[in-house]
């Protein structure tokens, strides 16, 4: 081993530069690969760096001014490590020649392999033969020869580029794709990589030829240019090819414009403008088309009627400070189904929620103010569903006292709601006897302010009994200017203003019992609750906007107020009784269960009173003794998870509602089967039994390859309502997905009954998308 000072390192510096330079090829651009700035190739060596040189033989020919080191040559200098069979340096010609199994590792971790390097000592010119490069981001490059010219250009001949993440653990893995180019020129002055006579190969077969492709290197964060084309195919739009163009306007502004040609509908133009600020961002989206073939859509729908269609949307989010956030989402379109029909990203849902919001989050308090407008996307010409939706403003504030109050926890909640609706949402219920109507919304305006406080304190008595007394007080002020429901069978309050209050005193008692064996532990916890309250004032006599959805099951058994919103209040005296169980077995099994019943003890039963939406009808709580509710679940170490929940009639134990799920997640298999059964609730709007089976599965049949599918079957109608199947390949460098989905839509809210989607993603290169490949049935 020999060590030398800085005056002897000219040879080593040139050798290092000869290797480092050739990493410059690795192109990284939004479209193709990564590149290293030529101007930064000089190794940053410490001033006091020393060279360590090890070799079997060192020969110095003073007459010829030539230095040769041979046999297992190892050079270490300033963090650079080089291995070769022989290194020769000529002081006369100023050239360095390294040969034989050359390997160079630079401080950043990139590795360069070559058979021969021949460069000038000032690195102005040079050649390399049979080069291979592995970068720290697991991309690979191989070239037959390489040449450096004028200190600015790197020219690689007959080069291959690919990415190979699995190679880090499996050297025998071969990537599915690579890019071959006859000549690649990297310009350090313009910071571009130019590929000439390049072709992209997949599965070893060329699928795309590019005479000339120029992309920015990685020193350029953003650069204007065309992106990968987007492809789609749907039943009623036809085949489509979209060409996106990215425009880097400034360091804080950019835009993407996409022109898509559809074989059935013509030319669709989309644009998205993005602007970033110090504390947030704003996105402006636009799209438009003049439909070429309206007859391909179902007759009598908005899709078949309109010719010129378009939309404009604005989305923004700003962090005012670490606690406060302000933003909005707004969509305006020419008709009520354009974005959904043309599957415009982020805007193609059945309901788009337009909103403006201000949110504040503290350590023990929370504030949220929002204004809503619901854009219902369906094919209805008259937009009836959208016109029945409210324009709403909702403000919530929650506060928890930082210190105990009388030894307990004090919380307060405030809600201010303002609702305005342009059209009454009336629905006739199909039941025997006189006509019955549900009112999901009334025409006019409605305001409500709610203030509620709750105090509770937990006591643990000798023997383990847990007692939690609960005190709560609530008050509401309402103002209404709504059209009276003409066919409402209840007692609707038509006064312009009303006030109501509710006082609650309750006790929660639990007695956990721990049972242990050598191989298991079990906790059995009987729970009893009693809440004493006066009757609900104006029960069913006020508008019900936010308490319309209601499900009584094991998860809501022990709720103090089981209504889902503020517009209804649970009144009267009620007791909730049940038992909770959790178990852990020594073989890795985990068990959980809840079962119980609720009892109306006195006063007016809020769930038995009439309501504009019949929310309490057939809920299981409308009788003095509620239906029985239960839930049971098992988690197995093998990956099997199962749960069963149900509601059973209190008089004859008939099943009223059931949800059963069994799933398995293993190394090769993932599957889930869900059965849902809901008995008819005619007054609540569900006129027939609903029995449905949903199943989904995925199977990994080979390394990186998986197949998946799902089916939803309506047992009552004997029809498959939704189904889909797909296949995917994912090795982290290459993602390929092909998905077919079909949905039977009797209400004509979906323009396309079936669709095919495909996605091909190449790491460091980009994505090619054909339609929609989202598959939500499995995680």
Image (tube, helix red, strand yellow):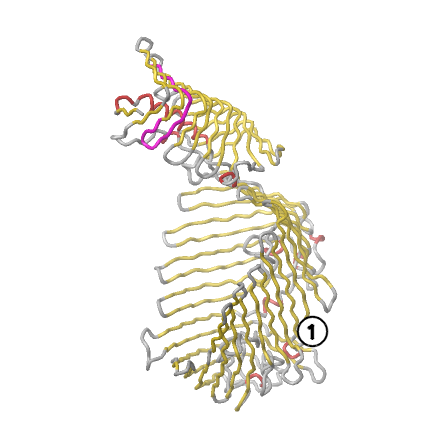
Predominant secondary structure, magenta span: strand
Q: Nearer the viewer, residue 203 or 742?
A: 203
The magenta stretch is 75-90
Residue 135 pos. (x, y %):
45, 35
**Which residue appears at 64% of the width and 56% of the height?**
697
Magenta run includes residue 84: yes
Q: Nearer the viewer, residue 203 or 475?
A: 203
Q: Quadrant of the C terminus?
A: bottom right
Looking at the rendered structure, the secondary structure element under dot 1 is loop
Q: Which residue is mark 1?
A: 689
> Which residue is at the far bottom?
602
Q: Is residue 11 above or below residue 338?
A: above
Residue 602 pos. (x, y %):
53, 91
Residue 532 pos. (x, y %):
47, 88
Magenta run includes residue 626: no
Is residue 334 visible in this depiction of the protein? no
Label 1: few (<14), some or many (≥20) within 10 Å? some
- The quadrant holding residue 202 is top right
> Which residue is at the far top?
63
**Number of disc labels:** 1
Residue 149 pos. (x, y %):
42, 21
Q: Nearer the viewer, residue 647 or 443?
A: 647
Is residue 539 visible in this depiction of the protein? yes
In the displayed structure, does residue 483 sit left or right of residue 695? left
Q: Is residue 427 above or below residue 244?
A: below
Q: Quadrant of the N terminus?
A: top left
């Amino acid at each position: 081993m020999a060590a030398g000072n800085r005056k002897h390192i000219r040879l080593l510096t040139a050798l290092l530069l000869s290797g480092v330079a050739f990493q410059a090829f690795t192109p990284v651009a939004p479209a193709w690969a990564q590149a290293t700035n030529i101007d930064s190739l000089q190794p940053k060596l410490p001033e006091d760096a020393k060279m360590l040189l090890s070799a079997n033989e060192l020969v110095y020919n003073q007459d010829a001014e030539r230095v040769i080191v041979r046999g297992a040559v190892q050079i270490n200098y300033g963090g650079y490590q080089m291995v070769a069979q022989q290194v020769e340096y000529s002081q006369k010609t100023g050239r360095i020649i390294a040969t034989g199994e050359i390997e160079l590792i630079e401080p950043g971790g990139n590795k360069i392999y070559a058979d021969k390097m021949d460069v000038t000592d000032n690195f102005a010119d040079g050649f390399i033969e049979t080069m291979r490069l592995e970068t720290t981001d697991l991309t690979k490059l191989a070239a037959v020869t390489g040449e450096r010219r004028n200190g600015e250009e790197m020219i690689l001949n007959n080069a291959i580029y690919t990415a190979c993440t699995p190679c880090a653990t499996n050297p025998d893995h071969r990537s599915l794709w690579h890019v071959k180019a006859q000549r690649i020129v990297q310009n350090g002055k313009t910071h571009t990589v130019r590929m000439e006579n390049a072709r992209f190969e997949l599965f070893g077969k060329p699928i795309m030829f590019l005479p000339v492709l120029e992309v920015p290197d990685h020193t350029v964060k953003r650069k204007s240019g065309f992106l990968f084309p987007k492809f789609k195919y749907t039943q009623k739009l036809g085949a489509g090819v979209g060409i996106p163009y990215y425009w880097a306007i400034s360091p804080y502004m950019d835009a993407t414009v996409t022109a898509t040609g559809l074989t059935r509908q013509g030319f669709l133009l989309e644009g998205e403008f993005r602007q970033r600020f110090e504390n947030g961002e704003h996105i402006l989206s636009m799209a438009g088309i003049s439909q070429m073939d309206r007859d391909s859509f179902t007759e009598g729908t908005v899709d078949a009627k309109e010719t010129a269609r378009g939309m404009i949307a604005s989305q923004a989010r700003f962090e005012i400070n670490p606690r406060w956030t302000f933003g909005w989402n707004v969509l305006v379109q020419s008709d009520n189904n354009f974005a959904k029909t043309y599957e415009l990203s982020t805007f193609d849902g059945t309901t788009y929620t337009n909103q403006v919001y201000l949110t504040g989050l503290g350590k023990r308090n929370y504030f949220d103010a929002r204004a809503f407008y619901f854009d219902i996307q369906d094919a209805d010409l008259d937009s009836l569903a959208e016109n029945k939706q409210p324009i709403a403003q909702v403000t919530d504030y929650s506060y928890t006292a930082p210190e105990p109050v009388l030894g307990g926890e004090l919380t307060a909640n405030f809600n201010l709601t303002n609702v305005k609706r342009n059209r009454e949402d009336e629905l006739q219920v199909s039941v025997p006897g006189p006509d019955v109507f549900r009112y999901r919304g009334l025409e006019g305006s409605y305001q409500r302010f709610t203030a509620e406080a709750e105090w509770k304190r937990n006591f643990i008595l000798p023997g383990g009994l847990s007692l939690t007394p609960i005190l709560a007080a609530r008050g509401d002020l309402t103002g209404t200017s709504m059209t009276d429901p003409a066919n409402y069978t209840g007692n609707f309050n038509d006064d312009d203003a009303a006030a109501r209050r509710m006082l609650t005193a309750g006790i929660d008692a639990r007695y956990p019992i721990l049972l242990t064996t050598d191989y298991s532990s079990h906790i059995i916890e009987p729970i009893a609750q009693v809440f004493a309250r006066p009757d609900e004032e104006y029960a069913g006599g006020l508008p019900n906007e936010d308490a319309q959805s209601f499900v009584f099951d094991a998860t809501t058994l022990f709720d103090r107020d089981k209504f889902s919103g503020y517009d209804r209040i649970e009144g009267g005296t009620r007791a909730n009784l049940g038992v909770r169980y959790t178990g852990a077995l020594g073989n890795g099994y985990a068990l959980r269960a809840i079962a119980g019943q609720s009892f109306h003890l006195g006063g007016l039963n809020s769930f038995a009173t009439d309501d504009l939406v019949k929310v309490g009808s057939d809920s299981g709580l409308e009788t003095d003794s509620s239906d029985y509710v239960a839930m049971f679940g098992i988690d197995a170490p093998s990956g099997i998870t199962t749960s069963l929940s149900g509601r059973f009639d209190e008089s004859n134990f008939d099943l009223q509602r059931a949800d059963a799920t069994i799933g398995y997640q293993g190394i090769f298999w993932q599957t889930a089967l869900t059965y849902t059964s809901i008995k008819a609730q005619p007054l609540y709007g569900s006129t027939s039994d609903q029995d449905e089976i949903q199943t989904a599965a995925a199977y990994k049949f080979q390394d990186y390859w998986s197949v998946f599918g799902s089916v939803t079957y309506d047992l009552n109608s004997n029809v498959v309502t939704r189904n889909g199947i797909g296949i995917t390949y994912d090795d982290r460098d290459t993602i390929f997905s092909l998905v077919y989905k079909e949905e039977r839509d009797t209400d004509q809210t979906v323009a396309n009954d079936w669709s095919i989607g495909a996605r091909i993603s190449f790491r460091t290169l980009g994505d090619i998308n054909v339609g929609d490949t989202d598959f939500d049935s499995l995680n």
